[in-house]
Image (spheres, helix red, strand yellow):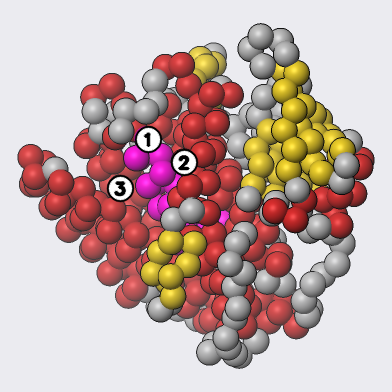
Amino acid sequence: MHLHLNSYGSYLHVKDELFEIRKKNAAGEVEKHQYAAHKLRGIVLGLGTALSTDAVRLAMRHNVDLLFVEHDGTPVGRVWHSRLGSTTKIRKAQLEASLGAEGLRWTKTWLDTKLGNQLELVRGLRKHRVQHGAYLDDKLTRLEALRASVAALEGPMVETVAATLRGLEGTAGRLYFETLSFVLPADYQFTGRSSRPAQDAFNAMLNYGYGILYSRVEKALIVAGLDPYLGFLHRDDYNHLSMVFDFIEPYRSWVDEAVFRLFTAKKVNKAHTDALTKGVSLNADGKALLVEAVGRVLDAETVRHRGRNLLRGVALQYDAHQFANALLGQPEAVVEAPEHL
């Protein structure tokens, strides 16, 4: 279970060895909610919230991840225990893989899965929106061609084909989001991806949802003993979580699905966003709606994954462990993923 504190003035502290959240409701009354530490996996704190050092200590004792995020959901820092929790051989192997053909193979695998998930979502639209059949068939054909182009790329390492990979990925993303916008009700349609700030409610929800996913991916990599900063495709810039941005690609469609469901069910309205000078942002109500939807997709819905029925959040951690074992030359190693994350 993950807690999200988004309301201005919310305060997290400890009472009777339980996490307690205090916040004022619309009537100005103080509400209190308590949670057992052993039932939590993470706590996300937005701007304008506060916590006590006792809460930090309790979180460290129970391996509860504390994450701090910007107004748009972008992670800015986390508190996590200082133990490595695994062998440094994994990180050494990760560095070696980044410099050769193995890194390219993994990068192509992640992008292929991402494109495959995008195709699957569009094919699902094709079944239920027959009136857009010709349009969707065209987009499917073009996305399938881009996926084939990614699979056909060869080279001694990622760097030699990185520009081409980014170009193919970018083109696929443009076609994919054009398609999602096209089939939405007219009031919800948008013009491409936008961030910092988002230009519309759909992108505001996507950005915040991806922020939630970024934090989950970073934690999964750390737990598996991987270095979130040592990527294969994304640049090794200062303080850039390159591997997080590489590894997240196959799972972005989970957030896309959660956001798309909200809009097609017409659960999003103008009361969920606030206008900015050059865009829009989610307000507390919008964040609460999205957090619930993304949490349901990640932690309440099972998928068939590698021959097992797993919660999506568990499948993500499972994949991180499998990646780490593969880097060590143990691709068939059995990894026992936890039942809950």
Q: Position of residue 84 (x, y in %)?
A: 82, 70
Q: How many marks?
A: 3
Residue 255 covered by magenta stretch: yes
Residue at screen point 64% across, 63% down = 220
Specify the amino acid type for callout 1.
Leu
Q: Which of the 4 image quarters holds residue 309? A: bottom left
Q: Which mark identifies residue 293?
A: 2
Q: Tags 3 and 1 in contact by the CB under 8 Å rule? A: no
Mark positioned earlier in the residue sequence (1 or 2): 1
Dot 2 crowding, Cα within 10 Å, few <14, some 14–19, many 20+: some
Does residue 83 appear left or right of residue 115 in this picture? right
Closest to the observer, 33 or 265: 33
Q: Which mark identifies residue 74?
A: none
- The chief SS type of the magenta part is helix
The region drawn magenta spans: 244-262
Q: Position of residue 12 (x, y in %)?
A: 80, 34
Using the numbered discs, state the Cα–Cα distance from disc 3 to disc 1 in whole angstroms: 18 Å
Q: Position of residue 321 (x, y in %)?
A: 61, 75
Using the numbered discs, state the Cα–Cα distance from disc 3 to disc 2 in whole angstroms: 21 Å
Q: Tags 1 and 2 in contact by the CB under 8 Å rule? A: yes
Residue 270 covered by magenta stretch: no
Does residue 53 appear left or right of residue 168 in this picture? right
Mark positioned earlier in the residue sequence (3 or 1): 3
Q: Is residue 132 above or below residue 153?
A: above
Question: Looking at the image, is mark 3 or mark 1 nearer the viewer?
Answer: 1
Q: Which residue is mark 1?
A: 262
Q: Which residue is mark 3?
A: 176
Question: Looking at the image, is mark 3 or mark 2 nearer the viewer?
Answer: 2
